[in-house]
Image (cartoon, grey):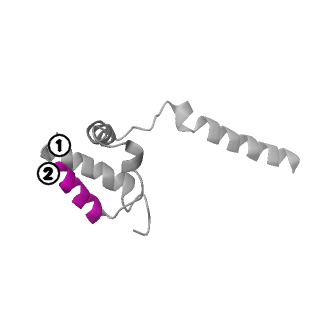
Amino acid sequence: MKKMVAIVLGLSFSCVVFGSPVFAGETKKEDPNKALFEKKCSQCHVASKINEGHRSKADLKKVLDRMTSKPACNINATEAKQIEMYMIGDMGPAAAPGL
């Protein structure tokens, strides 16, 4: 019985260690829209302030529309859509279930 437990534990350990992304050479890809969000939005805002509190998808869209309508905003329509996708995925309902 002890031998069987040792084998099961050994196999489990091997699967965890050698099957993990770190050992398999895989890395989690960062969302390219995150870099755009940080570059563009941090020109006027502190990132931690932007990330404060989760909003609904509609609220995030309103905020982004308001920000991109400002004369000093340097975000084109394509970039706005990419930032919206990042904000909804990272700070929206998917990131805060129940919203």
Counting other residues with Cα less than 10 Å from the Cα at mark 2, is it few (<14), some (14-19), or many (20 or more)? few
Q: Quadrant of residue 43?
A: top left
| Amino acid type, residue under disc 1 in the picture | Cys
Which residue is the site of mark 2? 69
Relative side of 12 to 83, left or right: right
Left or right side of 53 for 40? left
Tell me the SS state at disc 1: loop
Most prominent secondary structure in the magenta stretch?
helix
Residue at position x 40%, y 59% in the image: 54
Please tell me whether residue 32 is drawn above or below residue 97 in the rendered image: above
User: Relative to 68, is 23 above or below?
Assistant: above
Residue 9's image quarter? top right
Q: Nearer the viewer, residue 5 or 13?
A: 13
Proximity of marks 2 and 1: CB atoms separated by less than 8 Å:
yes
Which mark identifies residue 73? 1
Look at the image and give the residue range highlighted in magenta: 58-68
The residue nearer to you, when weighing 19 against 39, is: 39
Question: Residue at 56% of width from left, 38% of height from top?
Answer: 20
